[in-house]
Image: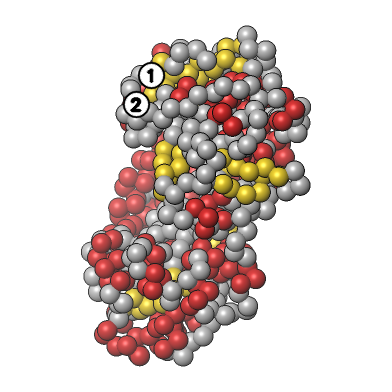
Amino acid sequence: MKKTVAILLALMLLPCVALAEPAESEYAAFSQWPVADGSLTVSIYMPQNSAYGVPAEETWFWPWFEEVTGIDFEITQILDSAMSEQKNLIFASGDLPDVLLGFGLTANEIVQYGNEEGLLLPLNEYINDDVMPNLITLMEYYPDIKSYITSSDGNIYTLCWVWEAAGGEEARTFIDTDKMRETGIEAVPTTLDAFTDMLYAMKEHYGEEIIPLGGGFDAYSPFYYILNAFGYVGPESSDGTAVAVRDGHAVIPATDETFYGALELMNQFYADGIIDRDFFTLDTTAVNAKCYDGLYGVYPFVPATVAPDDKEFEKHWVSVTPLTSNDQSEPEWRAANSIYTGGFALSAQTENAEAILRAFDALFAYEGHWLAWEGPVYGSETTQQYHCGGRGVVYDEEEGYTSVEFLDANGEKMEGNAYRYSVPSGVVAYAIGNYSVWFENPEETPNYFYHLVGVEPVLNVHTYETYEGERIESEVLSEDWRLSIMHYIAPYTITGYPSVVYMSSDDALRIAELEASLVPYMSNAIAQFITGDRPLNPEEFESYLQEIEGMGAAELNELYDGYYQQYLANLE
């Protein structure tokens, strides 16, 4: 490897020496390695973790990756704390490396540097069964990938990376099962009417001792859950001013006539003490304190985060499920985003695009994932020397890469820090450089941490079969709060409005201009309607809609929906 040039020096070093050259046959099943004979040099700019990062040549990954691919990587590292400034300077200079790795290019930057300035290489012609067969397979499993990586001019400028835990990443709201049972309710409510009845039953039973529906307007707001019941599939903690999907179109809920019903219910909740009288002034610290003090019947986040060391506290909470209502006939929930772009791009000037993409395609494969994420197979004659006192995986001829071992350099299980290295391309996480993760008991690490996209979880510790119908015994819940979400939320997830949208510079600027005036105005009006400071009746709400119409609400919805329809078209 050519000498790494560090723009800023790392603070932590982790020694790792590569001594052995891997055999080609070991990787033949999932890779095209080697793709070069060692005479090909590829330049890479990439970030380095400010706290835990080390020079690339001192990680296990890059020396090993050079050996298996036959490419000489010339790496320039940039501390992540300086990335934003350096990224702008690099593109302004026009002097780009072959590969931009981990730059976190936004959709707007991809449009600017790809569509408009031509600094990024369109990758369309290389994404095929010959050059990138593993990516093609993953795209078949995840049809959303094509839409996420296709820019507005029809070109693909960045590859994706995919991260999906085995459930539990969606928006989260939990019910206190102790309080639920005390009111005579044994099943999680599935309709808005039943949910409302539960809240009032709690209020009647406990009186002023509790707040049935916890959270604050700006701190773990439960409003998004109510909006969801009215058909708005949107982001967590939405106050109604963020774009959502309803009936196949993108819409800002607070600009829509159906929003009146959600406001009316929240106004009723406020007047009757179902939500906090301090709903509009609470911060997250106050919300968590009230939850831990037992004041909430419903908490709009994960109770385990309130008191992570109090295992008994976690045992009496269960996930909500999407609600149906007169305005929403089928339960739907916004899926957590698991497809990310902007982490891997090639310069338009690179002369070795095909070889580079053939090399990195292996990271989209099952085996490539485990090697890039967990480290080489422990005990392999050709890879054991790449350990740096960190991690490895165990390979079985029949099962493949089926179990995770936490090993030190001598093959002993670790009990402390474990180090890993990952690349923002393929089925791996986005972090760049080495960083530490603490496991008190490695053998019991839950399977969702190692869930692999496109295949069965490697450590299938928990399954849906744990539940029987609507059974919600606390011993089941205490096993894993994510399991509760997998049971009550995951079956109803849909994509919703995509997290990556390639807008033209003019449209992005116009949306920013419209939201600068509309969002504060709508948020203030929502608060006034809920508290009663502004009368809530059909005439006054219609007057409000006319006010925001004059501020450009229809134009804002039209812009958002145009890009949403384009996203849907790209799925075909």
Residue lying at 28% horizontally and 75% vertically, measured from the top left: 293
Image-based side of 280 in relation to 44, left or right = left
Question: Could you tell me residue 486's position as x and y percent?
Answer: 57, 64
Q: Quadrant of the C terminus?
A: top right
Callout 2 environment at 10 Å: few (<14), some (14 to 19), or many (20+)? some
514 versus 528 height, above or below: above
The reply to whether callout 1 and callout 2 are in contact (CB within 8 Å) is: yes
Q: Nearer the viewer, residue 518 or 79?
A: 79
- Count all numbered tags in the image, as a single digit: 2
Q: How is the image coloured?
A: secondary structure
Residue lying at 43% horizontally and 74% vertically, measured from the top left: 315
Image-based side of 561 in relation to 86, left or right = right
Question: Which element carries disc 2, helix, strand or loop?
Answer: loop
Marks 1 and 2 sit apart, C-alpha to C-alpha, by 8 Å
Q: Looking at numbered disc 2 in the image, what kind of residue is underneath it?
A: Ala
* Residue under label 1: 6
Callout 1 environment at 10 Å: few (<14), some (14 to 19), or many (20+)? some
Question: Could you tell me residue 300's position as x and y percent?
Answer: 39, 66
221 versus 548 height, above or below: below
Question: Could you tell me residue 480's position as x and y percent?
Answer: 50, 65
Question: Which element carries disc 1, helix, strand or loop?
Answer: strand
Q: Is residue 229 visible?
A: no
Q: Nearer the viewer, residue 47 or 312?
A: 312
* Residue under label 2: 10
